[in-house]
């Protein structure tokens, strides 16, 4: 019993000094700029499942949500929805906007961190353009 | 031995109960969802689960303590538009970052995940519809600096 207690204390002392290996979302630092595009809003006509996200998480962009243009990156236009809060997460959680090029989702923009997270394969978005 | 076990169970149970929020229910307090000042946004913080109730870390909003993540508890603060980071620390620090706009209402839900010695309490940004549904049975714990700035 005494030996187990001593062993437990040793384990606590040795491991308590070790930092946890937190995983994080990797992004490319980038700043969005104003967009000259004329189509500024679209609505999704189906759920869009996104499974190729960092740390094995998945997200669904919901059918019927509207997405408004907020800016542009070299990779595509940035859209944000007031109908759905979107985040990317590993150990930490980041609000994310979607980045769209030619009606396909090509990545995410992290507005607080000012970073771009690409998806490995673009995902076609079923959309109706409002204006 | 049996008597001692009963004592341990009693002490454990009372510790668990005292770790939960005890204020007015959200449905009774019925706070306004939007901030009274249109030049501010409102952030609701809540923790709907009993899991890991004894762990109740500080809630830091952009480096300032605004409340505690207490099981079955909620509180809210009003802040100007801008970028925000909420950090909760147990044996590690976990962060959620988001943008707040004037007149906007955001909901941060706290959950707990397994840790090595203690669970990790972390925040998630959730839709208003989800937050409103889950916060109903939570009790007000009185965040600090409720409408500062």
Image: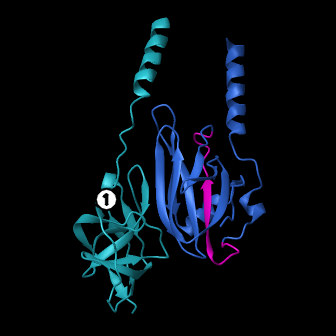
Chain colours: A cyan, B blue
Direction from residue B94 to residue A77 in the image, left or right: left
Q: Please provide percent x and percent y for residue A17.
A: 41, 29
Q: Residues within 10 Å of mark 1 (few under 14, many from 20)?
A: some
Q: Please provide percent x and percent y for residue B100.
A: 53, 70
What's the residue at 33%, 72% (across, down)? Answer: A31
Residue A1 visible to an observer of this rendering: no
Residue furthest left in the image: A121
Q: Which residues are magenta?
A: B34-53
| Residue matched to label 1 | A53
Where residue B54 sits, quadrant-wise, is top right
Q: Nearer the viewer, residue B71 or B56?
A: B56
Residue A74 visible to an observer of this rendering: yes
Q: Chain of mark 1?
A: A
What's the residue at 49%, 37% (across, down)? Answer: B91
The prevailing secondary structure element of the residues shown in magenta is: loop
Q: Is residue A39 magenta?
A: no
Q: Secondary structure at mark 1?
A: loop
Q: Please provide percent x and percent y for residue B112.
A: 52, 45
What's the residue at 69%, 65% (across, down)? Answer: B147
Residue B52 vs B145, above or below: the answer is above
| Quarter of the image that includes the N terminus of chain B | top right
Residue B124 vs A69, above or below: the answer is above
Q: Nearer the viewer, residue A38 or B66?
A: B66
| Quarter of the image that includes the C terminus of chain B | bottom right
What's the residue at 72%, 54% (across, down)? Answer: B142
Direction from residue B135 to residue A79 in the image, left or right: left
Q: Is residue B46 magenta?
A: yes
């Amino acid at each position: 019993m005494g030996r187990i207690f001593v062993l437990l204390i040793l384990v606590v002392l040795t491991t308590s000094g070790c930092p946890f290996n937190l995983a994080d979302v990797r992004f490319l630092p980038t700043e969005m700029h104003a967009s000259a595009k004329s189509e500024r809003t679209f609505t999704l006509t189906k759920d869009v499942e996104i499974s190729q996200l960092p740390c094995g998480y998945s997200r669904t962009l919901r059918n019927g949500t509207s997405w408004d243009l907020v800016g542009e990156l070299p990779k595509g236009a940035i859209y944000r929805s007031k109908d759905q809060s979107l985040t990317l997460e590993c150990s930490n959680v980041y609000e994310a906007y979607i980045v769209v090029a030619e009606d396909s989702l090509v990545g995410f923009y992290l507005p607080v961190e000012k970073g771009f997270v690409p998806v490995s394969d673009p995902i076609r978005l079923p959309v109706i353009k409002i204006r | 031995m049996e008597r001692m076990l009963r004592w341990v169970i009693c002490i454990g149970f009372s510790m668990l109960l005292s770790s939960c929020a005890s204020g007015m229910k959200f449905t009774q307090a019925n706070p306004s969802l939007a901030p009274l000042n249109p030049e501010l946004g409102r952030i609701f913080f809540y923790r709907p689960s009993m899991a890991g109730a004894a762990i109740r870390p500080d809630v830091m909003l952009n480096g300032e303590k605004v409340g505690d993540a207490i099981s079955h508890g909620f509180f809210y603060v009003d802040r100007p538009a801008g970028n925000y980071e909420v950090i909760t620390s147990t044996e590690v620090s976990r962060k959620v970052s988001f943008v707040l706009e004037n007149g906007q209402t955001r909901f941060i839900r706290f959950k707990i995940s397994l840790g090595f010695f203690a669970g990790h309490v972390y925040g998630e940004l959730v839709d208003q519809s989800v937050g409103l549904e889950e916060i109903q049975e939570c009790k007000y714990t009185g965040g600090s600096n409720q409408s500062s700035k």
